[in-house]
Amino acid sequence: MFVLIANLRLIVVRPMHRQLAILLLSAVTACAAPRNFSAEAGRASAKQGIASGHMRVYIAGTEAAGEVGVESRDRSLLANLPRDRSLPIGCTVPHASEAVEFARAYNLEIIHHLRQTKSR
């Protein structure tokens, strides 16, 4: 009976250890140094995406999130690109306003590239 209980305790304890590890990992990554959300970083990231063929459209915002820097006339250019919601979004979320500038610069660089390739 003890062995069964011991085995049962291991089954119960192990998920708790896994949950604790996930919780600690989340806390450590939340406290990590913030990503560079400057417009320059956005343009550089867009150029890397263009070079690798992995372009996307960033969603960002403080009070309302959206495709920052994208005008309605450009939506057809971007229709086949995936939307990326990985930037900080929300009026109380740290770095959300800086992320808007990053997203705007990134999206505009992608639009500029797609316009150039379309006109060729």
Image: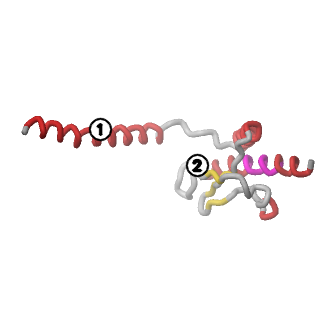
Q: Which residues are magenta?
A: 105-112
The answer to which of 36 and 58 lies nearer the viewer is 58
Q: Helix, strand or loop at disc 2?
A: loop
Q: Is residue 12 left or right of residue 76?
A: left
Q: Is residue 73 left or right of residue 67?
A: right
Q: Which residue is mark 2?
A: 86
Please, what is the three-letter code of the amino acid marked with disc 2? Ser
Q: Which residue is mark 1?
A: 17
Residue at image point 59% right, 39% down: 35
Please, what is the three-letter code of the amino acid marked with disc 1? His
Q: Position of residue 9 (x, y in %)?
A: 18, 40
* Quadrant of res 17: top left
Residue at image point 74% right, 41% down: 53
Q: Position of residue 113 (x, y in %)?
A: 82, 46
Eye-nearest disc, 2 or 1: 1
Residue at image point 35% right, 37% down: 21
Mark 2 and mark 1: Cα distance apart in space: 28 Å
Q: Position of residue 51 (x, y in %)?
A: 76, 37
Q: Helix, strand or loop at disc 1?
A: helix
Residue at image point 88% right, 48% down: 116
